[in-house]
Image (spheres, helix red, strand yellow):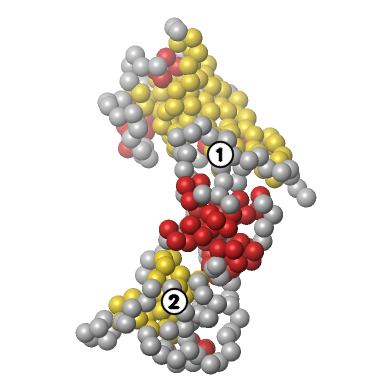
Amino acid sequence: MRAHLGDHLVIESPKTGTTQRDGEIVGLHHEDGTPPYDVRWSDTGEVTLVFPGPDAHVHHGEHGSAGSGGGAPSTSAPRPAHPVSDAASPAGVPNPGDIGRRVAAERERQGLSRAEVARRAVMAPEYLAYLEEHPAEPSMATLIRLSDALGTSVEALCGGGLDLPPGQGHALLNPRLRDLDPDECRTLLSTHGVGRLAVTTPDGPAVIPVNYEVADDAITYRTMPGSVPALAVGTEVAFEVDHLDEAMSRGWSVLVVGPAHVVADPDAVRGLAEHAHTDPWAGGTREEWVSIQPRRITGRRIEPAPR
């Protein structure tokens, strides 16, 4: 069996001859087009390493007729491999997964081209492009080859060390620290997530992570009377949200400063509870809603400096 990039692998039922599964071949592991192949399945969109069995054949499309498991190789000239990245998203914007971002970040940090990394990893450049631009679950064999090609480890590509403090990756070569305007800050705050609440306690300052919602421009969170987050009531507090992209060595932070008070109106409490996106991660009964009315919103972003 031999194939070209862009061919379709078809798996048929041995009893009925009907198609059980099919997918596009997006990666070749041998220059002569022999198995195994990296296949993006049409039913799930996932890419897996496939060693075709006797119930599989390749549909060559423009190359010619389909080939069986023991069929002769196609003699027609291969058509140019179309870039897999063209199908990144309906808008054509890449949407990589975590592994793809880490691969791309390490490749770019070392100044390597996709073609060079693909050559070292013995895979098609088109598949490496797909991996860097789409959420994918490459096989362990693929991860081992990529880690060897990049001089790193499978653990690092898969996000090992998640329990370590963030920010231990390499800094950008030409970073830029940019102030965010209030509208950008509100967009990044979005509607919910986890933020850090800075309050004053009898034992001194404390910073506590809380699940939060945004309602009418106010930051709201659930807690219980007597807890540390409840100490914010009646005081001016600071609330911070951030996001770090370890793979790309960039990130942003938003700081909200303002007075905090208990939401006492029953209708308002009912509305907050009904529209809450998540339950508090800390668990337990937390029925006291606290609202922070922003008096000042500031933010900063670390990004590559313009060339």
Residue 187 in percent (x, y) is at 56, 41
Q: Residue at x 58, y 52 (%)?
A: 151
Residue 139, compared with residue 30, is above or below; it is above
Amino acid type, mark 2: Pro
Circle 1 crowding by C-alpha within 10 Å: few under 14, some 14–19, many from 20: some
Residue 168 lies left or right of residue 162; in this view the side is right
Find numbered disc 2 in the image and state the secondary structure of the residue it sits on: loop
Residue nearer the viewer, 209 or 213: 209
Q: Quadrant of the N terminus?
A: bottom left
Circle 2 crowding by C-alpha within 10 Å: few under 14, some 14–19, many from 20: some
Q: Residue at x 35, y 81 (%)?
A: 56
Q: Earlier in the sequence, mark 2 or mark 1?
A: 2
Circle 1 is placed at which residue position? 244
Marker disc for residue 185: none
Residue 13 in percent (x, y) is at 26, 81
Q: Which residue lies most toward the left here?
A: 15
Find numbered disc 1 in the image and state the secondary structure of the residue it sits on: strand
Q: Quadrant of residue 179?
A: top right
Circle 2 is placed at which residue position? 35
Whether residue 192 is visible to the viewer of this picture, yes or no, is yes
C-alpha span from label 2 to label 1 = 40 Å
Q: Residue at x 62, y 30 (%)?
A: 298
Residue 291, compared with residue 190, is above or below; it is above
Residue nearer the viewer, 235 or 10: 10
Amino acid type, mark 1: Leu
Residue 30 in percent (x, y) is at 51, 75
